[in-house]
Image: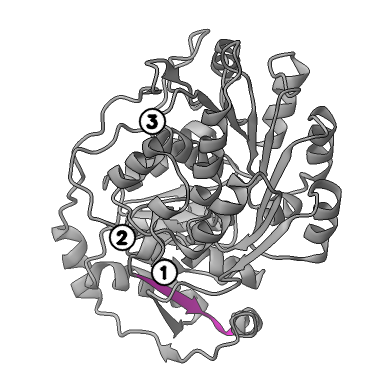
Amino acid sequence: MTAFSSLGLSDALLRAVQEQGYDTPSPIQAQAIPVVLEGRDLLAAAQTGTGKTAGFTLPMLQLLSEHRPPDGHQLRALVLTPTRELAAQVGESVSTYGRHLPLRSAIVFGGVSINPQKDLLRRGVDILVATPGRLLDLQGQGCVDLSHVQILVLDEADRMLDMGFIHDIKRILKLLPKKRQNLMFSATFSPEIRRLTSDILHNPTSIEVSRNVTAHKIEQRFHAVEKTEKMTVLAHMILAGNWSQVLVFSRTKHGANRLSQQLERNGISAVAIHGNKSQNARTRALSDFKGGLVRVLVATDIAARGLDIDHLPHVVNYELPNVPADYVHRIGRTGRAGASGEAVSLISRDEEKEFRAIERLLRQKFDVQPAPAVDLDMLQASAANYVPQPEAPAAAPRAAKSGNGQRRGGGQGRAKPAGGDQPRRASGNEAAPSRRRRPRRSTPA
């Protein structure tokens, strides 16, 4: 099997990878890293959970560290993502794998104060991870110089098109140097993606890994449930199975709020996360969920591609998604980096069309089982006796130090905001690394 040491990465990067407990690259990493190191443009189709973030982060860090400008830190690499959560996840990977390199990075997105992000950019960064809207806001205020960008990464390009970012992306492209390396990652090679590719990439190498395929270690279960009984069945599965960490997907924001409130009334701690929540509320919800303070996180599809939760054991589709590909992204929150996981879908009579679309997409027939029998007395007793076991409190959020002792900015409230803003609670992406020994995993995220 391929080892990271055979891919041409520097000792500093290999050390960071080893410290994370990884030894073997995933297929997307083994194929993408050499291409990026050669300086070629890349178009990669890779599902969530296949390790694509490290597939571009590691070689990008290598190239930037090999050719440093003499006059300090310049913005030389730009990573665009569709959501705040995904920006935070990618930024954390940059910080983690670049911890032994003299590079600075920052993360910028909307929904939080822009002033701390301006401060970080004034100090100079080598790598910027951004959502398109906030990047254009900062550029319009003269806070970002894109004229030295050597590497452009479009992560989850299909999602950016779905969310209507195409015009923002075209505006950003006009601000970048004509000569640069372009890396595009997408879950699909749709006609829209191919058109965007022709506008951005030059003679790219194409890689296709695990297209619309669910991870082998994810156990998928489907239950036929009357719509009015879904809440009771969900509570039964959580309590009877003693599930302590469950990510539940709802189709709508209102439905996510209602479901989290119903779970709370049944003695199951829950919180909702969706686009109408403030960034502070989203960060706090994710932090509480990762830390074991909340048992259930109810999310809309905004979280399907942006959440990276180590060893998440259970994902539940309370409602099937309207777009079948979103099913793959949803359940991809579990079974990550080679771990096992369980994905349960509750299917009501009016979701037959969505279920068949998922089967066609995955080219697989699934058995639909009856809903498990519910014992209401047992549910009440289980809820009353459940004792949460949160992890040790995380350290206060702080900026990671780069190899030369400089602080590496994050743009997520790592520094105390100016102008009287309250410091935000750390999310799992912002907290200091746990001191517990990590189990060795074969491939990085």
Q: What's the magenta region?
A: 341-349
Picture coordinates of residue 79 (x, y %)?
63, 38
Q: Which residue is mark 2?
A: 266
Q: Nearer the viewer, residue 210 or 247?
A: 210
Between marks 3 and 1 in the image, the one whose residue lies nearer the viewer: 3
Q: Residue at x 58, y 45 (%)?
A: 37
Point out the tag, 2 or 1, that comes first from the N-terminus.
1
Q: Which mark is residue 293?
A: none
Q: CA distance from mark 3 to mark 1?
A: 45 Å
Q: Residue at x 39, y 33 (%)?
A: 430
Q: Residue at x 46, y 92 (%)?
A: 367
Q: Which mark is residue 231?
A: 1
Question: Do the CB atoms of the residues marked 2 and 1 lie less than 8 Å apart?
Answer: yes
Q: Which residue is mark 3?
A: 99
Q: Nearer the viewer, residue 136 or 261?
A: 136
Secondary structure of residue under mark 1? helix
Amino acid type at circle 1 is: Met
